[in-house]
Image (tube, rainbow, N blue to C red):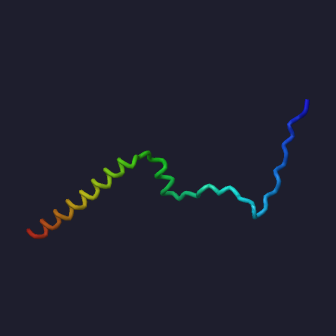
Amino acid sequence: MQENIPVPEKQSNNNDVTQPKPEQKNAKEKLYDKIPVTVHTLDIIIKLLIAAIVVTVILGMVAGRTA
């Protein structure tokens, strides 16, 4: 029987098309990858945060008038 001898790959030149390197992710992106959230859920969260900001501003305006 013949043994399977690995054939060395030919060395690539700078002119060859190379494989892109995997993207380096920062800490924020790594954290986001761990949290499974759909786009629909993110839309709801954003709308709730905007509503909370609007309510806070309105309450601040009302409280400022009466003070």
Look at the image and tell me in which quarter the C terminus lies: bottom left
Q: Is residue 3 visible?
A: yes
Q: Is residue 67 visible?
A: no
Look at the image and tell me in which quarter the N terminus lies: top right
* Mark count: 0
Q: In this rendering, would 19 be left or right of 34?
A: right
Q: In this rendering, would 43 be left or right of 65?
A: right
Residue found at the very far left of the displayed protein: 66
Residue visible at 70% across and 58% down?
A: 18
* Corner quadrant of residue 5: top right
| 35 over 52 or under it: above or below | above
Residue visible at 20% across and 65% down?
A: 57
- Residue 22's spot in the image, x, y percent? 62, 55
Residue visible at 13% across and 66% down?
A: 63
Residue visible at 59% across and 57% down?
A: 23
- Residue 24's spot in the image, x, y percent? 58, 58
Q: In this rendering, would 5 be left or right of 54?
A: right
- Residue 53's spot in the image, x, y percent? 25, 61
Residue found at the very far right of the displayed protein: 1
Pick the front one: 26 or 2: 2
